[in-house]
Amino acid sequence: ALGGGAVLDAVGYACATFHRGMRLIRIPSTVLAQNDAGIGVKNGINAFGQKNLLGAFYPACAVINDFQLLTTLAHRDRIAGLAEAVKVALIKDRAFFEWMEREADALAHFDHPASRYAIRRCAELHLGHITGAGDPFERGNGRPLDYGHWAAHKLENLSQHRLRHGEAVAVGMALDGLYANALGLLSDADSERVISLLLRLGFNLCPPELSLKDAHGRSRVLLGLEEFRQHLGGQLSIPMLSCIGTSVDLHEIDDALMEQALLRLVSQRAPLTLGEGCAQ
Ligand SMILES: NC(=O)c1ccc[n+]([C@@H]2O[C@H](COP(=O)([O-])OP(=O)(O)OC[C@H]3O[C@@H](n4cnc5c(N)ncnc54)[C@H](O)[C@@H]3O)[C@@H](O)[C@H]2O)c1
Ligand SMILES: [Zn+2]
């Protein structure tokens, strides 16, 4: 399978089912595919209006990351994949996060040495988690690698996939950072650093989908929490940051507080340290 995350997922799923499984070699061709999707054991396709509804856990027998493939990528796709590097740094590796802060300008310009290191470190951390955390097939509820993903999956869907996965993950991480801050779990300084790094890398943290309401006036993004609970099989488990580099699982989310976090992200009151508002 040679391609971005979408192609790898579809081909991986086909490989898992055809003749009850055939050998798979992945050659990821986007930043996100090289640092995350191509490394993992999950393969999924969207069906019946739901993200990753059909799929299989199916490891590849080899993954070949060739940086040269990334030189033809659109700028947008060079940046989108960095969201997963920020994610894994936030939940596992404070030093990597601090390195990304120092190299933010180089990463935003896709300078090769910095980008190459970010992809490699992100891939290593993903691989380390899958092979070393004792739950490669996600039997348990705790999924730190899903940081920022409950909102991201909903946003991708609401945008009818206008938003790239990484772009949606960046928004989801900012939202959950503000929620953890409102809860008193994450300090003001750390939540501002999360948002500041995402902005410096070039992410738009206020896509119009954040403001969509249903017929009852409820935020459509927040309805994603209930969908995520169902996806987990009943008990909610959402990774949240207690500080940069460490996550904890929360099993309850205060809807009113999450709505406040959402409003803070959408409104000018968010601590957007670069002086940028949230104009859409
Ligand atoms: N299975 C997993 O563990 C896992 C993990 C993360 C993300 N994903 C999935 O991966 C998908 C996102 O992956 P993505 O960000 O790679 O997006 P993508 O696969 O949609 O690719 C983005 C764009 O880049 C183009 N492209 C790919 N390689 C290129 C190259 N070398 N040069 C120029 N253009 C190129 C593609 O045609 C596409 O238009 C989402 O569907 C997401 O759910 C899966
Ligand atoms: Zn992801």
Image (tube, rainbow, N blue to C red):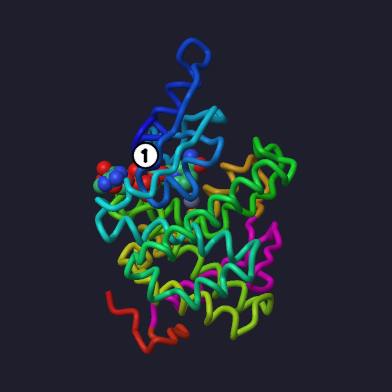
Direction from residue 92 to residue 264 in the image, left or right: left
User: Is label 1 in a helix, a strand or a loop?
Assistant: helix
Within 10 angstroms of label 1, few (less than 14), some, or many (20 or more) residues?
some
Residue 182 location in percent, x, y?
61, 78
The residue lying at 63 percent from left, 62 percent from top is 91
| Chain part drawn in magenta | 238-267
Towards the viewer: 149 or 91: 91
Which residue type carries mark 1?
Answer: Ala
Disc 1 residue lies near ligand 1 with CB under 8 A: yes
| Residue 256 makes an appearance in the image | no
Task: Please tell me whether residue 1 is drawn above or below residue 247 in the rendered image.
Answer: above
The residue lying at 37 percent from left, 59 percent from top is 80
The residue lying at 64 percent from left, 40 percent from top is 233
Residue highlighted by disc 1: 6
Q: Quadrant of the C terminus?
A: bottom left
Task: Please tell me whether residue 119 is drawn above or below residue 97 in the rendered image.
Answer: above
Direction from residue 18 to residue 212 in the image, left or right: left
Is 241 part of what is drawn in magenta? yes
Q: Quadrant of the N terminus?
A: top left
Residue 277 location in percent, x, y?
34, 84
